[in-house]
Amino acid sequence: MGRANDARRDVTRILVADDHPMFRAAMVVAARRVRPDAEIVEAGTLAAALDAGRGGGFDLVLLDLRMPGAEGYSGVALLHAELPGVPILVVSSAEAAQSAAAVQRFGAVGFIGKDQDLATIEAAIAAALAGTRIAAPIDADLDAVAGHVAALTPTQLRVLLGVLAGRLNKQIAHDLGVSEATVKAHMTAIMRKLDVQNRTQAVLAARALGLAH
């Protein structure tokens, strides 16, 4: 059994998360051109991507920003929290000038536009698999705040996203299947990690980073 598991881990595993079947298929083709023997898992929603990610064993995630269940850069933040050691390459039609730096603040190794040719996308996939970060503009202030957000656990991120959606503590507790006291404890930890004094400041900090519009 151990040898079988070791053999499986010799195979590159790539998660392709995009809600458009045709573009998802194109990403599968690009990934296979880079790693012909790769095992590729596809997901059409953020929830499906997170479910797949919890199984572990991935070497790369190719992620679209605009998917069902994702808002702003929440998809990047949540997948990075679930898979902290796995490179995430965002492939999206979002505005590159704004998104390239933002996705890296939330843990991605880089951003590439869907309008790029296949060879450019393949080069980005190869670079991400090699552990290379794609250069993006630097904003020291935003990078510092993003570092605090990136330190949140997956559950803390879900609590923060619930707050951003305007949900009450009891509603968030119901969504997550925990007690209201647990949600309050998570909010205390979130405010400490974000270095803010109250719930409103935590919301403003997250909104400034594009977690909500």
Image (spheres, rainbow, N blue to C red):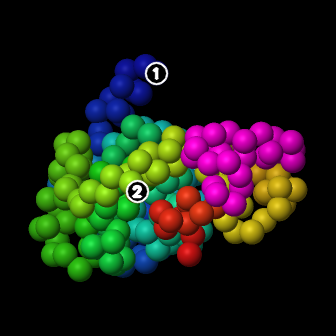
Type of secondary structure dominating the magenta stretch: helix
Q: Position of residue 5 (x, y in %)?
A: 41, 27
In magenta, the rendered stretch is 177-202
Q: Which residue is pictured at 40% across the width and 56% down the height?
A: 142
Q: Position of residue 7 (x, y in %)?
A: 33, 29
Residue bearing mark 2: 142
6 or 93, nearer to the observer: 93
Residue 105, disc:
none
Q: Position of residue 56 (x, y in %)?
A: 48, 39
Residue 63 highlighted magenta (yes or no): no
The amino acid at mark 2 is Leu
Q: Which residue is pictured at 67% across the width and 39% down the height?
A: 189
The amino acid at mark 1 is Met
Look at the image and tell me in which quarter the C terminus lies. bottom right
Q: Is residue 112 above or below residue 128?
A: below
Q: Which residue is pictured at 43% across the width and 19% down the height?
A: 2
Circle 2 — which element? helix
Tell me which numbered mark, 2 or 1, is placed earlier along the sequence: 1
Left or right placement of residue 189 versus residue 137 in this view:
right
Residue 108 seen: no
Residue bearing mark 1: 1
Quarter-of-image position of residue 113? bottom left
Residue 187 highlighted magenta (yes or no): yes
Between the residue at mark 2 and the residue at mark 1, the CA separation in whole angstroms equals: 47 Å
Quarter-of-image position of residue 33? bottom left
Q: Position of residue 87 (x, y in %)?
A: 33, 46
